[in-house]
Image (cartoon, rainbow, N blue to C red):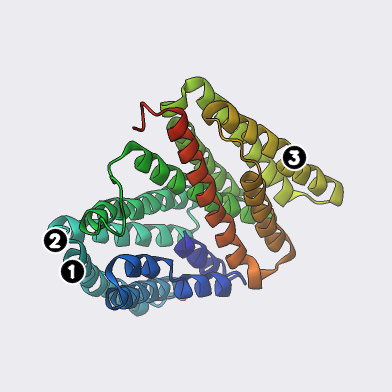
Amino acid sequence: MVVAKESAAAAAHNDEYTGYLTLLTTATGLSDLMRSAFGDTAAAQFQRLWEAQDGYLVDYTIGLVTHNQNKSDGAMSGLINGFVPDFSQFLTTTTQLPPGPTTQLVTEQVLETQRMIDDQVAQNYSKMYTDLRTAFAQTSRIGDALAPKIVRRFPDKFPGDPSNRAADLRASLNELLEEHAYLATMATDAAVGGRTVEQTAAAKALSDNAEALGTAFSAVVGPAFGTRFDQVWAAKNSALIAYAAATDTAAAQSAQSTLTGAYVSLFGGFLSDSTGLSERPSIEAQIRATIAVIDDQRTKAFAQLATDDRTAAAAMHSLADLITAATAAKFPTLFG
């Protein structure tokens, strides 16, 4: 998602580029996770490989934007002939994943990211959002392959059963809610900028994400609650766009009140009725974090936009974890 934000800004030649580039190249969350399992040496090796990938992706985008075919071709060669085999070998060595499937997973992730960047530069927004969701799902498939191997190799560090249904639900909710957070701020950015074609494509991606979330809830708490979720989520998405597109103070205040008042109440009630979770502070914290991102977009506060965007997405993780814990407690026969 951060690659998508950075490359979109590069393609549009706008001032969001520097912030998202900095976020892309300085974030250490993944290497910190690797350190927690394998130690400092492996984490440092991972970070070097990941930084190389990011550098190639940035160069590929710049090559396309500046019509420098040699630069973009060289970047793709570096990704396919350098990063893919080196990173696949690292994963195989550290986790004992089989070489063939690992290389295939990493190759697909690189190629799907390439397609997404190509779409952005070509301003083919309907295809771009489809390819973005595909690329995002592919990164999750890599995580799904890695996590059980790491847990089984280090049960003292990561106790529990990685195949437990609650673990699957937690991972799915984290993935889908984080995806929603980033897609939402892409949609609001398009609305703020008056980019109608892109906003329509982003809205379609948000709708597809909401459908996936509704299906996840329906599978556990029943179709009636899935339908109710769809209604709450659709109203939230409409209010986010209304806030981003507001042209006067009254309209902005009305949309913000809907988000911090009606949405928080409705989603809190939905979670209470469906899972038994009585937790509104986390819902309100996440929506206020999202509003802060939209405020950055509206006021062109580019220096803090990328950081605030990541904060809003990260706030979804704690919410997903709370929902999972409450759901598992309410339905012990499903999650025993």
Pick the residue in front: 102 or 18.
102
Residue behind mark 1: 89
Residue 161 lies, with reference to residue 69, above or below; the image says: above
Q: Are marks 2 and 1 in contact (CB under 8 Å)?
A: yes
Q: Residues within 10 Å of mark 2 (few under 14, many from 20)?
A: some
- N-terminal-most mark, 3 or 2: 2
Pick the residue in front: 314 or 290.
314
Residue behind mark 3: 261
Q: Residue at x 33, y 67 (%)?
A: 34
| Image quadrant where one finds the C terminus | top left
The kind of secondary structure element at disc 1 is helix
- N-terminal-most mark, 2 or 1: 1
Q: Which mark is residue 22?
A: none
Residue type at numbered disc 1: Gln
Q: Residue at x 14, y 61 (%)?
A: 99
Number of marks in picture: 3
Q: Residue at x 62, y 35 (%)?
A: 267
Residue 300 occupies quadrant? bottom right
Residue type at numbered disc 3: Gly
- Expressed as whole percent of the image width and height from the top left, the position of residue 19 reads 57, 72
Q: Residues within 10 Å of mark 1 (few under 14, many from 20)?
A: some
Is residue 9 at least partly visible in the picture? yes
- Expressed as whole percent of the image width and height from the top left, the position of residue 67 reads 43, 74
Residue 158 lies, with reference to residue 23, above or below; the image says: above
Residue behind mark 2: 99
The kind of secondary structure element at disc 2 is helix
Residue 87 lies, with reference to residue 253, above or below; the image says: below
The kind of secondary structure element at disc 3 is helix
Residue 182 lies, with reference to residue 7, above or below; the image says: above
